[in-house]
Amino acid sequence: MNASDTGRTGRRRSAGGALSSRVLLALGASAGLTAAVALPMAYQAHEARSETDQPSSPRVEVLGTSTVPEAAGIALREGLYWVSADGSAERVPLHGSTLSGRVQLVVDLTEVERVDFRLNDDAVVTDEEPPFQLDDEPIDTAALGPGPHDLVATVRFDDGRNELRQATFGVEQE
Protein backbone atom coordinates (compact mmCIF):
# COMPACT_ATOMS: atom_id res chain seq x y z
CA MET A 1 0.00 0.00 0.00
CA ASN A 2 1.38 3.42 -0.87
CA ALA A 3 0.72 6.82 0.72
CA SER A 4 -2.03 7.74 -1.72
CA ASP A 5 -4.21 4.75 -0.64
CA THR A 6 -4.44 5.77 3.02
CA GLY A 7 -5.86 8.81 4.72
CA ARG A 8 -4.99 10.36 8.05
CA THR A 9 -6.77 7.60 9.91
CA GLY A 10 -4.81 4.94 8.13
CA ARG A 11 -7.87 3.41 6.46
CA ARG A 12 -8.07 2.63 2.80
CA ARG A 13 -10.01 5.13 0.78
CA SER A 14 -11.21 2.63 -1.79
CA ALA A 15 -13.69 1.01 0.64
CA GLY A 16 -15.20 4.39 1.53
CA GLY A 17 -15.31 5.39 -2.14
CA ALA A 18 -17.13 2.19 -3.11
CA LEU A 19 -19.65 2.70 -0.35
CA SER A 20 -20.26 6.27 -1.51
CA SER A 21 -20.80 5.05 -5.07
CA ARG A 22 -23.38 2.50 -3.90
CA VAL A 23 -25.22 5.11 -1.83
CA LEU A 24 -25.22 7.56 -4.72
CA LEU A 25 -26.42 4.84 -7.11
CA ALA A 26 -29.25 3.88 -4.73
CA LEU A 27 -30.24 7.53 -4.26
CA GLY A 28 -30.24 8.08 -8.02
CA ALA A 29 -32.38 5.00 -8.63
CA SER A 30 -34.78 6.05 -5.89
CA ALA A 31 -35.09 9.56 -7.32
CA GLY A 32 -35.66 8.15 -10.80
CA LEU A 33 -38.43 5.83 -9.62
CA THR A 34 -40.05 8.61 -7.62
CA ALA A 35 -40.04 10.89 -10.66
CA ALA A 36 -41.43 8.10 -12.87
CA VAL A 37 -44.40 7.73 -10.53
CA ALA A 38 -44.90 11.32 -9.36
CA LEU A 39 -44.66 13.18 -12.67
CA PRO A 40 -47.63 11.44 -14.38
CA MET A 41 -49.70 11.92 -11.22
CA ALA A 42 -48.80 15.61 -11.07
CA TYR A 43 -49.69 16.01 -14.75
CA GLN A 44 -53.10 14.35 -14.21
CA ALA A 45 -53.80 16.57 -11.19
CA HIS A 46 -52.85 19.66 -13.19
CA GLU A 47 -55.11 18.66 -16.09
CA ALA A 48 -58.04 17.94 -13.77
CA ARG A 49 -57.56 21.29 -12.05
CA SER A 50 -57.31 23.19 -15.35
CA GLU A 51 -60.50 21.51 -16.66
CA THR A 52 -62.53 22.63 -13.65
CA ASP A 53 -60.96 26.09 -13.38
CA GLN A 54 -61.95 27.30 -16.85
CA PRO A 55 -62.89 30.98 -16.64
CA SER A 56 -65.63 30.46 -19.26
CA SER A 57 -67.43 27.90 -17.11
CA PRO A 58 -70.36 29.55 -15.43
CA ARG A 59 -71.10 28.77 -11.80
CA VAL A 60 -74.71 28.74 -10.83
CA GLU A 61 -75.62 29.44 -7.22
CA VAL A 62 -79.07 29.36 -5.70
CA LEU A 63 -79.47 30.40 -2.08
CA GLY A 64 -79.81 27.46 0.26
CA THR A 65 -78.43 24.96 -2.22
CA SER A 66 -75.08 23.67 -3.32
CA THR A 67 -73.00 25.24 -6.07
CA VAL A 68 -72.66 23.15 -9.22
CA PRO A 69 -69.91 24.01 -11.70
CA GLU A 70 -71.01 23.43 -15.28
CA ALA A 71 -67.52 22.31 -16.34
CA ALA A 72 -67.67 19.36 -13.98
CA GLY A 73 -69.92 17.60 -16.45
CA ILE A 74 -72.80 17.58 -14.00
CA ALA A 75 -75.11 19.82 -16.03
CA LEU A 76 -77.76 17.79 -17.81
CA ARG A 77 -79.44 18.58 -21.10
CA GLU A 78 -82.56 16.46 -20.67
CA GLY A 79 -85.79 18.31 -20.00
CA LEU A 80 -84.91 21.55 -21.84
CA TYR A 81 -87.06 22.14 -24.93
CA TRP A 82 -88.27 24.80 -27.30
CA VAL A 83 -91.76 25.12 -28.72
CA SER A 84 -92.80 27.39 -31.58
CA ALA A 85 -95.04 30.27 -30.51
CA ASP A 86 -97.68 29.41 -33.09
CA GLY A 87 -97.91 25.80 -31.91
CA SER A 88 -96.84 24.44 -35.30
CA ALA A 89 -94.11 22.24 -33.80
CA GLU A 90 -94.02 19.71 -31.00
CA ARG A 91 -91.53 20.28 -28.22
CA VAL A 92 -88.01 19.85 -29.55
CA PRO A 93 -84.82 19.30 -27.47
CA LEU A 94 -83.15 22.70 -27.12
CA HIS A 95 -79.47 21.71 -27.03
CA GLY A 96 -77.94 21.96 -30.51
CA SER A 97 -81.09 23.42 -32.11
CA THR A 98 -81.03 26.44 -34.40
CA LEU A 99 -83.97 28.73 -33.71
CA SER A 100 -85.72 31.54 -35.57
CA GLY A 101 -88.91 33.48 -35.07
CA ARG A 102 -90.83 33.44 -31.80
CA VAL A 103 -90.38 30.49 -29.42
CA GLN A 104 -90.98 29.40 -25.84
CA LEU A 105 -88.05 27.92 -23.88
CA VAL A 106 -89.40 25.36 -21.40
CA VAL A 107 -88.40 22.78 -18.81
CA ASP A 108 -90.53 19.66 -19.05
CA LEU A 109 -89.81 17.39 -16.07
CA THR A 110 -91.99 15.81 -13.39
CA GLU A 111 -92.18 16.60 -9.67
CA VAL A 112 -90.69 20.08 -10.10
CA GLU A 113 -91.26 22.79 -7.48
CA ARG A 114 -89.45 25.68 -9.16
CA VAL A 115 -87.09 26.52 -12.04
CA ASP A 116 -84.56 29.37 -12.05
CA PHE A 117 -83.66 30.29 -15.65
CA ARG A 118 -80.60 32.23 -16.82
CA LEU A 119 -80.25 33.09 -20.50
CA ASN A 120 -76.80 34.29 -21.65
CA ASP A 121 -75.77 35.33 -18.12
CA ASP A 122 -78.75 37.70 -17.82
CA ALA A 123 -80.67 38.05 -14.57
CA VAL A 124 -82.29 34.95 -13.11
CA VAL A 125 -85.97 34.45 -13.93
CA THR A 126 -87.89 32.14 -11.58
CA ASP A 127 -90.99 30.20 -12.56
CA GLU A 128 -92.93 28.36 -9.85
CA GLU A 129 -95.92 27.21 -11.94
CA PRO A 130 -96.07 24.61 -14.70
CA PRO A 131 -95.50 24.82 -17.55
CA PHE A 132 -92.05 26.00 -16.48
CA GLN A 133 -90.92 28.51 -19.10
CA LEU A 134 -88.41 31.32 -19.37
CA ASP A 135 -91.07 33.94 -20.01
CA ASP A 136 -94.87 34.10 -20.15
CA GLU A 137 -94.63 35.50 -23.66
CA PRO A 138 -92.74 33.84 -26.53
CA ILE A 139 -89.20 35.09 -27.09
CA ASP A 140 -88.35 36.84 -30.33
CA THR A 141 -85.09 35.16 -31.30
CA ALA A 142 -84.14 38.16 -33.48
CA ALA A 143 -83.78 40.15 -30.24
CA LEU A 144 -81.18 37.63 -29.03
CA GLY A 145 -79.06 38.15 -32.12
CA PRO A 146 -77.44 35.55 -34.37
CA GLY A 147 -74.99 33.01 -33.02
CA PRO A 148 -74.77 30.67 -30.03
CA HIS A 149 -76.73 31.24 -26.82
CA ASP A 150 -76.80 29.41 -23.47
CA LEU A 151 -79.77 28.59 -21.29
CA VAL A 152 -79.00 27.42 -17.77
CA ALA A 153 -81.85 26.19 -15.58
CA THR A 154 -81.57 25.23 -11.92
CA VAL A 155 -84.43 22.82 -11.29
CA ARG A 156 -85.72 22.47 -7.72
CA PHE A 157 -87.58 19.19 -7.30
CA ASP A 158 -90.37 18.48 -4.80
CA ASP A 159 -87.99 16.36 -2.70
CA GLY A 160 -85.61 19.34 -2.25
CA ARG A 161 -82.97 18.26 -4.80
CA ASN A 162 -81.52 20.81 -7.20
CA GLU A 163 -80.25 19.84 -10.63
CA LEU A 164 -78.49 22.01 -13.15
CA ARG A 165 -79.70 21.80 -16.75
CA GLN A 166 -77.82 23.53 -19.57
CA ALA A 167 -78.35 23.82 -23.32
CA THR A 168 -76.53 25.72 -26.04
CA PHE A 169 -78.58 26.68 -29.07
CA GLY A 170 -78.09 28.87 -32.11
CA VAL A 171 -80.13 31.69 -33.62
CA GLU A 172 -80.26 32.21 -37.37
CA GLN A 173 -79.58 35.63 -38.80
CA GLU A 174 -82.82 37.00 -40.19
Image (cartoon, rainbow, N blue to C red):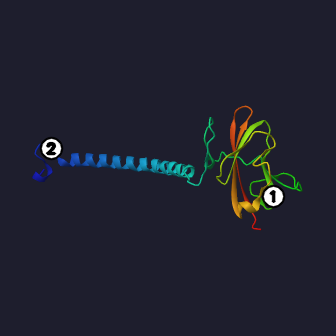
Residue placed furthest toward the top = 159
Q: CA distance from mark 2 to mark 1?
A: 96 Å
Judging depth in this view, the residue of 81 and 136 nearest the camera is: 136
The structure residue drawn at horizontal position 80% and vertical position 55%, both measured from the top left corner, is: 103
Is residue 11 shown left or right of residue 164? left
Q: Position of residue 59 (x, y in %)?
A: 60, 47
Compared across the picture, whether 43 is left or right of 140 comes to left
Residue 76 - label: none
- Which amino acid does the dot numbered 1 rest on? Arg
Residue at left offset 80%, top offset 53%: 138
Q: Quick one: which residue is furthest to the right in this view?
A: 88
Closer mark to the observer between disc 2 and disc 1: 1
Q: Nearer the viewer, residue 144 or 10?
A: 144
Q: Residue at x 26, y 45 (%)?
A: 19
Q: To which residue does mark 2 refer?
A: 11
Looking at numbered disc 2 in the image, what kind of residue is underneath it?
Arg
